[in-house]
Amino acid sequence: MQEGTVLIYAIANQKGGVGKTTTAINLAACLAQSGERVLLVDMDSQANASHGLGVRVPKGQPAILDVLLGECGIASIVRPSSVPGLDLVPSSPDVAGASVLLPALEHRESRLRNALAEPGFPRADYSFIFIDCPPSLGLLTVNALVAADQVIIPVQTEYYALEGLAQLMSTIGAVRLRLNPALTIAGLVLTMVDLRTTLARQVEQEIRTHFPALSFKTVVPRNVRLAEAPSHGVPVFMLDPHCPGSDAYFDLALEVVDHG
């Protein structure tokens, strides 16, 4: 990555429970721990990325939806997280209203991209910006894809792992064609992997066979510490720096840097 370049990654998959938020939090946190300035944008109405970094938006306070509606600038809601060097644009349950409110607005697909390009937003302060997408292919995810340079797709090693990937790839292709020609796929990252099981090994082989050039080498194992960390409002390395989950996300961060 060239000095001064800001890379924006959308963490996307319309399937829920595949490790999008876990990947967004821990990948961003590992890069911040290594000395980078990182911003995480929470686009999900569940606000799990915000809560997982120790940030809760009081009712009535602005969050990402207010930015998308043009009611405040994104710089005004950036908050420090529990990790030094990692800032957060928080979400709130109000984001659930985006599917009703955004379609009526001009430039509805590019509201986030425009917000990140606002003169008052110190974009150049960051080396990486990660966008945690909701589990859908609606306007919030499209906004993330339009704003992003690259997409990271977490894929759980389960029986239906490939189901929906074709639809996601089609959406990425449509965004590239109509709205963001520079968008590329950084890679697929296998999550919640238990290689002791035959199914996990079969799914990994299937993913790597179908997407040989797009599969990250790192696999993220099933790890109780990864599941526990959000309840403490910290990434996994702050809870247990030597657990398999911590090791995996540091390895993935190295791959992302090398890829970028």
Image (cartoon, rainbow, N blue to C red):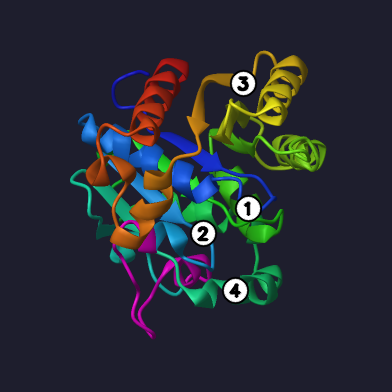
Q: Secondary structure at mark 2?
A: loop
Residue 117 visible in the current orientation: no
Neighbour tally class for label 4: few under 14, some 14-19, many 20 plus, Cα within 10 Å: some
Give the residue at mark 1. 141
Give the residue at mark 3. 215
The image quarter in which residue 128 lies: top left
Mark before the other along the chain sequence, 3 or 4: 4
The residues bearing labels 2 and 4 have C-alpha atoms spaced at a distance of 10 Å
Tag 4: amino acid: Ala
Q: Which mark, by number, is residue 43?
A: 2
At a point 26% along the width and 41% down the height, the residue shown is: 240
The image quarter in which residue 49 lies: bottom left
Tag 1: amino acid: Thr
The residues bearing labels 3 and 2 have C-alpha atoms spaced at a distance of 25 Å
At a point 26% along the width and 37% down the height, the residue shown is: 32
For discs 3 and 4, the disc positioned in front in the rendered view = 3
The residues bearing labels 3 and 4 have C-alpha atoms spaced at a distance of 32 Å
Nearest the viewer among 134 and 260 is 134
Which part of the image, by quadrant, shows the C terminus?
Answer: top left
The residues bearing labels 2 and 1 have C-alpha atoms spaced at a distance of 8 Å
Please indicate whether residue 248 sits to the left or right of residue 80 in the image.
Answer: right
Give the residue at mark 4. 96
The residues bearing labels 1 and 4 have C-alpha atoms spaced at a distance of 13 Å
Mark before the other along the chain sequence, 3 or 1: 1
Tag 2: amino acid: Met
Q: Secondary structure at mark 4?
A: helix
For discs 3 and 1, the disc positioned in front in the rendered view = 3
Mark before the other along the chain sequence, 3 or 2: 2
Q: Looking at the image, do the residues carrying marks 3 and 2 touch, with CB atoms under 8 Å apart? A: no
